Amino acid sequence: MTTLIKEIDYGTPKSDSAKMVTLEIDGQAISVPEGTSIMRAAMELGTQIPKLCATDSMKSFGSCRLCLVEIEGRKGTPASCTTPVAAGIKVRTQTDHLAELRRGVMELYISDHPLDCLTCAANGDCELQDMAGAVGLREVRYGYEGDNHVFAKHNGSENFRYKPKDESNPYFSFDPAKCIVCSRCVRACEEVQGTFALTIDGRGFASHVAAGMDEDFLESECVSCGACVQACPTATLMDKSIIDKGQPDHSVVTTCAYCGVGCSFKAEMKGDEVVRMMPYKDGGANEGHSCVKGRFAWGYATHQDRMMKPMLRDKITDPWREVSWDEAIDFTARRFKEIQAKHGIGSIGGITSSRCTNEEVYVVQKMIRAAFHNNNVDTCARVCHSPTGYGLKQTFGTSAGTQDFKSVDKADVIIIIGANPTDGHPVFASRMKRRLRDGARLIVIDPRRTDIVRSPHIEADYHLPLLPGTNVAVINAIAHVVVTEGLVKRDYVAERCEPEDFARWEKFIAEPKNSPEALESITGVKAADVRAAARLYASAGNGAIYYGLGVTEHSQGSTMVMAMANLAMATGNIGREGVGVNPLRGQNNVQGSCDMGSFPHELTGYRHISDDTVRDLFEKVWSVELDAEPGLRIPNMFSAAVEGSFKGLYVQGEDIAQSDPNTKHVNAALEALEFLVVQDLFLNETAAFAHVFLPGTSFLEKDGTFTNAERRINRVRPVMAPKQGMQEWEAAARISTAMGYPMSYTSGAEIMDEIARLTPTFAGVSFDKLDRLGSVQWPCNDAAPEGTPIMHVDKFVRGKGRFMITEFVPTDERTNRFFPLILTTGRILSQYNVGAQTRRTANVAWHPEDVLEIHPHDAEVRGIKDGSMVSLSSRIGATTLRAVIADRMPQGVVYTTFHHPVTGANVITTEHSDWATNCPEYKVTAVQVTPSNQPSEWQVEWEQRENEHKRVALKPLVAAE
Amino acid sequence: MTRVFVPNDAAALSMGADKVAFAIKAEADRRNLKLEIIRNGSRGLLWLEPLVEVATAKGRIAYGPVAAKDVASLFDADFIKGGKHRLCHGLTEEIDYLKRQERLTFARCGITDPLSIDDYVAHGGFAGLTAALKKSGADIVKDVTDSGLRGRGGAGFPTGIKWKTVLDARADQKYVCCNADEGDSGTFADRMLMEGDPFTLIEGMTIAGIATGATKGLIYIRSEYPQAIAKMKQAIAKATASRWLGDNVQGSDKSFTLVVRTGAGAYICGEETSMLDSLEGKRGMVRPKPPIPAIEGLFGKPTVINNVLSFAAVPDILSKGAEFYRNYGMGRSRGTLPFQLAGNIKQGGLVEKAFGITLRELFEGFGGGTHSGRPARAIQVGGPLGSYIPASQFDMPMDYETFAANGAMVGHGGLVVFDDTVDMARQARFAMEFCSIESCGKCTPCRIGAVRGVEVIDKIIAGIERDKNLIVLDDLCQTMTDGSLCAMGGLTPMPVQSAVKHFPEDFDRPPVAKAAE
């Protein structure tokens, strides 16, 4: 049994100064960096000066007045949190006078605080309680009859200061009666999260914490990131799970299974039950911060919908039948073998999941290559970031982002393209916003006015609201300005890049057709703004590009990735802190699932299957002969299934029926399969077409690693035994064994050791090392034993950086008078991907349904009112959903999310895809929107399938005696 | 043409000066007399407001307090030629109250047309700035340091040292901020100067900007001073138009711009760091020091923050020399201080005198005793957080160090007089109550302490466990004094403890019996 991890709170942030200052605290000498507070210096000596308003995640504030100290030769009693160290000073942290002052302050605090410690949810974890003990408070001589915020009645009448508990947020409660007005919540909201939803309202004794305009938390701008709850030293802001279950008794550090930020959390437990997820301060990706999903939305892991038993059925119209693991595995292996015998080796394949661990993905792709004897393996990253892999490999030589997240702290200009970090990658967005508030400049290239364009204390210098599908034109125009206005960093290019490729590119990009003016009519972006943005990026020191699926999910996704790489190289913005080209990965392990050899043409570490040396290595270690021919990509599998040559599919934790484009086509493919195996937590949309359902493990049960968007390999530690009885890699290994290729692992660590042995970029990775260092960023090998935060430092991975020609070729998807609007899709903060997890949590409080955002003018001309139901139709399909009129939409563009299956956003999307990688063009679909009062045909079908295909047969009831 | 002066200072306006000016104009028109009515600032003889003056060959003749109904009789008495009248005080300059003052900062106030640059220059204005434009920043700072000028807002910090810190700080932008959030009870000197001689403040701030390398200045004026706000804005526009402000001041390579910002009614914004928060558009909350504003002030940049009177003292120092200024005063309190006499006093007003004058000279010699005619029991000096000084200490000289040694403070130079009917326990309670209302709410000793202070004093007044509660009060005062973040909570115990100390009998009275039904 592990203990409850309590991180040391140094009271104030670390100073970055290189200059050391030596001082004396209570007679002990200590050297600390200049700028360190006396409080922190004391804590480094192990001396905890009493404090309430200070905590090391935010700037010192100096309000509680408990941390007063005496300094020899200085008058008064300065606060140790706000007083920096100075050379040679002699500090005393405890004297009779200080003791009296602290008791005096505590006496005041407690005179306005309820005395219900024994029944208080913070009992045992309350800093106020601790401090009362520490300063030796024995009596409150003011009594409790005075003015207060504690009691509903005061002197027999209503106490106007009293406010009842706010229970509106589903995850935490706010009890103003317990508030000591230390402002930690307000400061956390400002400094850590950057939302500015909280404030102190009123003056003097009337000062109180107010959410928004002094309204309920749920109604306010609060994004429920939990930073305030974490910061609260009392029970004022309190997790409801703690109120319900009491304080945890042990904790395990693990990694969040939501987005690609990969936050580290302490899973705080009682027995094998999670009572709270607390962001971990030493987590490299998040450094103690969290968002509403990771912090609170973990309840899906024990949701009643979760399947705990393997299930089989012969036909998809039959109800499911619960079976043992042995039966499920034998059945699966037998059916796959039968199909191969009948239709050929290549007639089956599998899809790995970006939500599973590296180890699970590795084992599944190994099963396919070694036991299926083909390369029909692909990953769901196909449909999100495959162009990133392709584009960055072509230009830089490796398929990954160039920076660590911390790098953004050094950026001078940030370009965000096709990403909505405050919703999609909220914890990284907070870091980015902090840098923006500190003065970095911002350029946003996005059709929508996303929140980061203008939010409290942040405003983009340039928002280029381009027409969806014209990314490449805009970025070419920016590069055109850089080249033609003499902003190219010639020295850098000459030293670091292939000269001939550069010369060719320079000539191409300088052509008048690539000028902002020439492209204005195509992109819809003012040429002057493009020019200004280009100058800003090229000439402001460190320029950093961050991008998301708005870049990749286009028919020119790969072109765009290369175009950004070109721009970064031309301006010398690769290879140091503060710069780079950085994909914001959608899912927790997109990077990892790509690294793990999930693509049909690549083994682990992005090495081509046709490379004899690489294949030899794997063949030796795996003791099996491998096919040198790349297998089928996901879209090829679907087409082959419809054609009839592809018959069996193993799907690991991905809901292709909801997430992949052109749902009707996907469903047709799934229906055409003879045999479909789905491994997942829930009976998802895809499972409706499956013959075997293998219950999956939640991240709380997994033993493995996730690799986040900054290539950081984080440990996923099991905090409880697999609830369905088996690790997912074990299930795959047993299927493989049953099919004739024996595989057996006893732990995730053993799998990682094999990965390390076979993958040069992972050569130095082991669970031992991860436990020791917390995390490492690949490449991690002899050359970089502790990993590589920044890539391409002295030279590019491929040697010289390669400029690629990035001709803008518009998509074939065009608007016309029947489909005059462009639909673009995305996600929102509280929901995640297909919603399988978040829809099964209280997060639905923020987003109960997908809505269609539409510009007021587009709505007006169609007679659409805010909140009315509309039909959204494309050339492919139609669905019905609620319209919301939003002025952040440009005219001509509508937007929706795909979190709810009933919406069927992907019924609308087309099969256009990236020319290089087949990444679907989710972001551009020509549509029409009309008022509607009924579900679409597809939705009626879905409803029916929802009822029929997911039935589980009841066990016969044991007759009563 | 005869010039008649009718002040439009807020004190005069509150006594009907506009009506008087209107009546004079109407009466002159009726009598077909040509007059030029100049709306000047106040001379500071507030008990005589509205004080109407007429320029004659002998000098300006004063009439006051003039009401609109007196105007016809003034014309009848031929006041425009200085004719005799029951309201006539003879030559203004010869009025004892004024004659005995040492007016440096207020030398022009009430004399000139506040918005006339020509008038200002004719009376020695801009001589200091002209001198400063020829000097290096370091030399200007040296002059100010040598003059011994200390911050007139209350803290008495040497102005030259503050300026030097800003001068030595490196930054792409520095600021000069004038604290004109004059919220202390019984004070009005800042307002009088801004309304009566705004160019002096502009000149002083511009010199500060030139001295320290700050190119932007802001004047933070409380919203309760609409006339001052309007005057300062007009004066800034005029000074800018005549190139005493803006780019390349008077053709030099120095630039300085000024803007006025209006407060929103919080006393705490007179505390310099809260004022910075307010100027930045935030709610006014006290910031911890360090960092001091001279290093990290407005928007995190090095900032000179001084009171109106500190800036207004500077032009003289530059034009007449540091020596001239430091020759006034006593001990380490150099120069003059414009004292403000208020409360229960016969002749309230502004008295600018060198440091060293005693409280009694101010209260009796200038103020003429109490308004009620009863004996004075206490004078509160330095605003609502200042000490109550008992009659036995009225002979204390006005000097920062002497006051500090006696548990009191000079502050902004405001005197509020109380006669022997005052209940000092109620006054002590008021100090805590004031703090509880005006606390920014940031630090615990001030936020909760002031509320408990009121309650404890209520218990003492009610005779509930009096001895115990006097100890609790003393402990609370200690916690507030040494534990508070800023001077608001830190000084609130000063009036409380001075009242307990000097007037213990007021805390030991039998509780007032409730009237029987």
Image: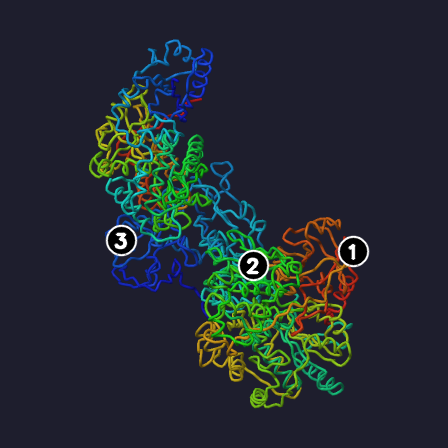
Locate residue A838, reporting x and y percent.
62, 62
Q: Are marks 2 and 3 on the same chain?
A: yes
Secondary structure beneath label 3: strand
Q: Is residue B256 above or below residue A589?
A: above
Q: Name the residue that disc number 1 marks.
A: A934
Find out whether the residues at labels 2 and 1 contact each other: C-beta distance under 8 Å.
no
* Circle 2: residue type: Arg
Secondary structure beneath label 2: helix
In front of the other: A627 or A144: A627
Locate residue A356, reporting x and y percent.
59, 73
Looking at the image, is mark 2 or mark 3 earlier in the sequence? 3
Q: Name the residue that disc number 3 marks.
A: A71
Eye-nearest disc, 2 or 3: 2
> How far apart are the alpha carbons under marks 2 and 1?
47 Å
Q: Name the residue that disc number 2 marks.
A: A531
Asked if residue B502 lies left or right of residue A959, the reply is: left
Numbered label tally: 3
Q: Is residue A552 above or below residue A177?
A: below
Quadrant containing the N terminus of chain B is: top left
